[in-house]
Image (tube, rainbow, N blue to C red):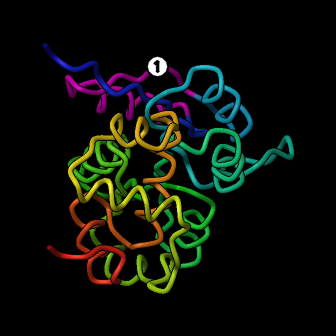
Amino acid sequence: MTPSPLRLLIADDHAVVRAGLRALLEGAPDLDVVAEAHSGEQAVRLALELSPDVVLMDLRFAHGDGGIDGVEAVRRLASAAPALPVVMLTSYSGRADVVRALEAGARGYVLKAGPPDELFRAVRSAGAGGIGLAAELVGHLVGQVVSPAAELTQRETEVVRLMADGHSNRSIALSLHLSEATIKTHLIRIYRKLGVDNRAAAVSEGVRRGLLELT
């Protein structure tokens, strides 16, 4: 059975950019643009109404109406819907901009001038619970946003240990008497704290930090 395509929300204040992104993304069979937003406020409202799988968010919007920027929109979504991944898609590659967006809760950061494959990879990675960063940003930014000394909570440690035992999200949720959505939220925070972007790397880092014992 073919899996359902990832449902995307595009947020950008330029109609031409939104149209181009829609045409590009919908050319992939596993991606489907369900809505477009022209402001940060509209992006937050539509994201909460439609619950897309991934939000593509511009960093800066025109503020003629005194609206919010992309980072504030990410911050609001991270608070209201922490399991909803947001990928920043912008022309700005400055270190401060990237760090600010990731610290607000963005799950990815790619450049409009970058290759389409990089955008596809970031969207799919974020949709799968990982992190999607432009290749040129990874080396010198991830370590600053994700502190190697960040400590996991007791619950997060339990999740890592169950992952190491091969449990799926559903199985972990049942074991801890939590919802799958809550487990996904824990995974997002675990990945961020450990500086990884997938389950295997999280387990490996857990072993390195002494959270898990090798048998």
Compared with 65, 59 (above or below) is below
Q: Position of residue 202 (x, y in %)?
A: 30, 66
Residue occupying the point 38% across, 35% down: 21
Q: In the displayed structure, does residue 117 sit left or right of residue 93?
A: left
In the depicted structure, whether residue 39 falls above or below residue 75: above
Callout 1 amino acid: Val
Number of on-image labels:
1
Asked if residue 31 lies in the magenta stretch, the reply is: yes
Q: Residue at x 24, y 59 (%)?
A: 164
| Quarter placement of the C terminus | bottom left
Q: Residue at label 1? A: 34
In the image: residue 13, left or right of residue 133: right
Asked whether 186 or 136 is in front, the reply is 186
Q: Secondary structure at mark 1?
A: strand
Point out the stretch of residues depicted in magenta: 15-36
Give x and y (percent) for residue 133: 35, 62
Relative to residue 142, is residue 109 depicted above or below? above
The image position of residue 59, as x and y in percent, is: 59, 55
Residue 100 versus residue 26 in the image, above or below: below
* Residue 100 or residue 183, whichever sits in front: 183
Residue 205 colored in magenta in the image: no
Q: Residue 19 at what x, y percent from top left?
A: 43, 28
In the displayed orientation, state which residue is furthest to the right.
Answer: 66
Tell me if mark 1 has few (under 14), some (14-19) or many (20+) residues whose alpha carbon lies within 10 angstroms of its own. some
In the rendered image, which quarter contains the N terminus?
top left
